[in-house]
Image (spheres, grey):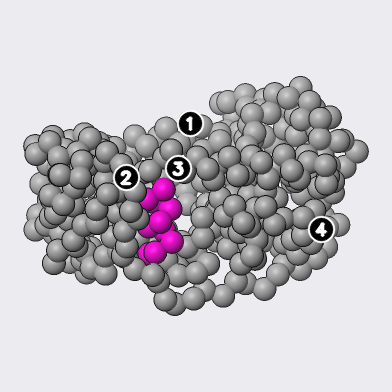
Amino acid sequence: MPQEIFSHVLPNGLTLLAERMPHVRSAAFNIMVPAGAITDPDDASGLATVLSDIITRGAGNLDSREQSEKLDSLGVDRSESVGGFNMHFSGVTLARNLRAALAIYADTLRRPHLPEEELEAAQSLALQDLQGLDDDPQTRVMVELTRRSYPAPLNRDRRGTPEGINALTIDRMRSQYESLFHPTGIVISVAGDIQWDALKSQIEALFGDWAGQPRAAQKIASAILGSGHVDKDLEQTQIALSYPSVPIGSDEFYNARGAVAVLSQDMSSRLFANVREKHGLCYSVYASYETFKDRASIIAYAGATPEKAQETLDRTLHELRTLKDGIEQEELDRVKVGLKAALIMRQESTSARASSLTSDWYYLGRVRPLEELQSKINGLSVKSILGYTERYPVSDVTLVTLGPKGLELKA
């Protein structure tokens, strides 16, 4: 059955996307607001995270408890999250309850109470999340890698800082809301058993008279901090590194993803097989791909005992650097199967589809149809991936370690 994908941009700049999936009984939504961590003032780091919490504590004619109970009665499995550029509100429910759920979220976006009596609780939760980094060294080293490998404000952690969170006042929360929540740039995506005409009419009724202009785009610095070590008495040394790749809009994007998959798609991939299994150097090792609109990175992680940490780093870098020397057809075939399997599973989830619609629109200004994705995966070849690794070799590496002793980044 061909995909049924729809899009509509309201005169005020709000975008509605939808994919009709008539074979399911549920519907999922994803609301993206350009109010991510990069908008946090320098002295209020963590504001976006606290705002994403307190904004859901009462809106329209419902107080915090009434709003929560109403969404629960509709069976809405929901969450809020903050990224670098955007804040997301997402949920999934029975298709027949979607209309009522969207009406509540329209009030959340347009008429939140932002109650002062709820601020302390929202701050407390944010501080607990931040303190959790002390018990999660893998996440902590990744936070430090981001801080050192990207320029400000792209390098901010959405968790913020204790000083920034504690400094928040309700007046500052409300001022930030007024500054950031405007229809232009907001994307609402819905996937599931929907009727497009009815959905479009409802969104126009809920948001069509919303006015306002977004704040000017954030300026991105040019300098990065570079490699570094965080001294901490741990039984394992946490190793994280990154180097530049191509962003999602590049013609080389699928080759970059293919290269990462050869390295780290499953237990037969090179990093797991050669660093962990063959040499027994570490329990966990992997590579991943991360993108912004205009830049991207390949990231690698490993955790090893201090005695084996340097060799773990050396062998991980060896696998990254020697990928350009050759790829077996068997490896490529396995990568294609894995990428297609992931694609098929995403197609079967309304939540995944709603998220994909939003992501595609944000990064590309359009929605990629399934046929295009399948064609790009089928078009991957040993030659095309090796060509990418030659044009974009492992260079300008940022290394961050967390543990009792730093490591040497060898040439």
148 drawn magenta: yes
Mark 4 is on which residue type? Asp
The foreground one among 299 and 175 is 175
- Asked if residue 147 is positioned above or below residue 49 in the image, the reply reads below
Q: Residues within 10 Å of mark 3 (few under 14, many from 20)?
A: few
Q: Is residue 293 left or right of residue 49?
A: left
Corner quadrant of residue 106 = top right
Q: Residue at x 50, y 69 (%)?
A: 152
Which is more foreground, mark 2 or mark 3?
2
Residue 179: percent from the left, percent from the top?
Answer: 76, 64
Which mark lies nearer to you, 1 or 2?
2
Task: Report which residue position mark 3 lands on.
Answer: 134
- Disc 3, SS: helix
Q: CA distance from mark 1 to mark 2?
A: 45 Å
Marks 1 and 3, Cα distance to the nearest angstrom?
A: 37 Å
Cα separation, mark 4 vs mark 3, equals 31 Å
Q: Which residue is mark 1?
A: 348
Q: Amino acid at mark 3?
A: Asp
Residue 171: mark in rendering: 4
Choose the circle earlier in sequence order: 2 or 3: 3
- What residue does disc 2 label? 233
Q: Is residue 125 above or below residue 177?
A: above
Q: Residues within 10 Å of mark 2 (few under 14, many from 20)?
A: few
Give x and y (percent) for residue 113.
84, 46
Amino acid on which disc 2 is placed: Asp
Name the residue nearer the viewer: 215 or 114: 114
Q: Earlier in the sequence, mark 1 or mark 3?
A: 3
Q: Amino acid at mark 1?
A: Glu
